[in-house]
Image (cartoon, grey):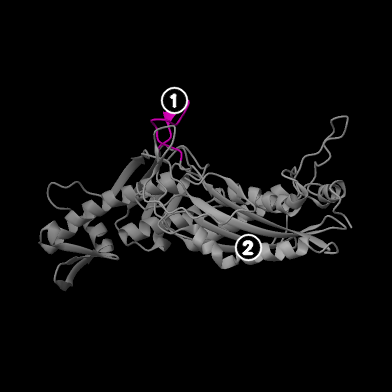
Amino acid sequence: MWWLTTLRLTPVPTRPSSQPACSTSSLAVTTFLRHTPASKVKAVDYKGLRAEQKAKRADPNSPTLMGIGLVTFTEVVGAGPSKICDILGVGMFDSCEIRIHPTGSAIARMGTITQGQGHQTTYAQIIATELGIPSEVIQVEEGDTSTAPYGLGTYGSRSTPVAGAAIALAARKIHAKARKIAAHMLEVNENDLDWEVDRFKVKGDDSKFKTMSEVAWQAYHQPPAGLEPGLEAVHYYDPPNFTFPFGIYLCVVDIDRATGETKIRRFYALDDCGTRINPMIIEGQIHGGLTEGFAVAMGQQMPFDAQGNLLGNTLMDYFLPTFVETPHWETDHTTTPSPHHPLGAKGVAESPHVGSIPTFTSAVVDAFSHLGVTHLDMPHNAFRTWKALREHGAAL
């Protein structure tokens, strides 16, 4: 299991594994390294960076200190299994209700609530994939306590790991009923049907099929005898385990020895969040998390004067990076599906924040490591870094 590890002068680690590690809570840490992330990091020429750093350190007139931060991490998200997670005694399951209308359109209600993560897009895509309904005709409704099934909300990268699973399983209940209706309409046994994109087809005869839209109309118009009308389902998903997204990040910084200004020359972020439902949504979340991690590590603070007055109480005083300050992000991924999640998804929104902050700090500290420095407080703004340069005799 890869817990948060800071690496400076050690080789890039490789640890392929086919067995889950065990945690103290007796839950298996189910992160199987189908692909070894560290092997992909070799593409950033880690050895070459170290050689460049060594040459710069040998030059007393070098205008900059070069630092390299390399961090691996594993997160524990997707709260959570009710056997160990609850809020005031209520288990941390989540839920979904899906109703297919006679027209073939749908409404889906969940107990989560979006905070800008693009839930409507991702959730509709799950339903569209499971049921063959165009996402454009799927209405996603979240967090309305007067209509939605009970849920525990959005936080801790739990939306796709928990609510996403409930959505998939609710859709599969509908799919199973739709198969019965389609078999009745085509006058065949259920086992004689294949599913393809948006329709049930008779095996061996592609000309005989019923689309999900046709099945939806039949469910309300003339369902088979003994089968109740309608096409809807509710599912409450209590995860059997957490999910364990992981990653490996590398940062290269150049610190101006005269001013203390730190420039992020390169930032490479590899994440493994399991099955990638919507890559564009994932990229957006990773870019946002990396940018906020950059803000935390390099500038955000809440300073007080000797009388206890807050000195950073406006956005003019509190660092919120814009496109001017934000570095260029190089993103990469491996895909190792969660073995217990219905879709194999593991969650991603928190990973870049968790992984990037120690990566920035590791790079800054590494720039001073040849001077015996093993720790520097965040944030690593120019003034603090300039003071560290003077303190350790590295200022110009």
Disc 1 residue type (three-letter): Gly
Name the spot of residue 265 as percent of width and height, x first: 71, 64
| Residue that mark 1 sits on | 89
Image check: 330 left or right of 314? left
Q: Which of 368/116 is in front? A: 368
> Which-is-in-front pick, marks 2 and 1?
2
Image check: 359 left or right of 227? right
The residue lying furthest to the front in this view is 58
Corner quadrant of residue 237: top left
Secondary-structure class at tag 1: loop
Name the spot of residue 327 as percent of width and height, x first: 69, 62
Q: Which residues are magenta?
A: 79-93
Q: Is residue 172 magenta?
A: no
Q: Is the residue under label 1 in contact with that under label 2 (CB below 8 Å)?
A: no
Q: CA distance from mark 2 to mark 1?
A: 42 Å
Q: Which of 276/358 is in front? A: 358
Sequence-earlier tag: 2 or 1: 1
Q: Is residue 88 something one can see in this rendering? A: yes
Q: Residue at x 62, y 52 (%)?
A: 356
Corner quadrant of residue 205: bottom left
Disc 2 residue type (three-letter): Trp
Specify the label residue 329 is tagged with: 2
Q: Main secondary structure of the magenta part?
A: loop
Q: Which of 348/166 is in front? A: 348
- Check disc 2: other Cα within 10 Å, few if <14, some if 14-19, many if 20+: some
Name the spot of residue 137 as percent of width and height, x first: 40, 61
Q: Residue at x 37, y 51 (%)?
A: 18
The residue lying furthest to the bottom in this view is 207
Secondary-structure class at tag 2: loop
Q: Is residue 231 something one can see in this rendering? A: no
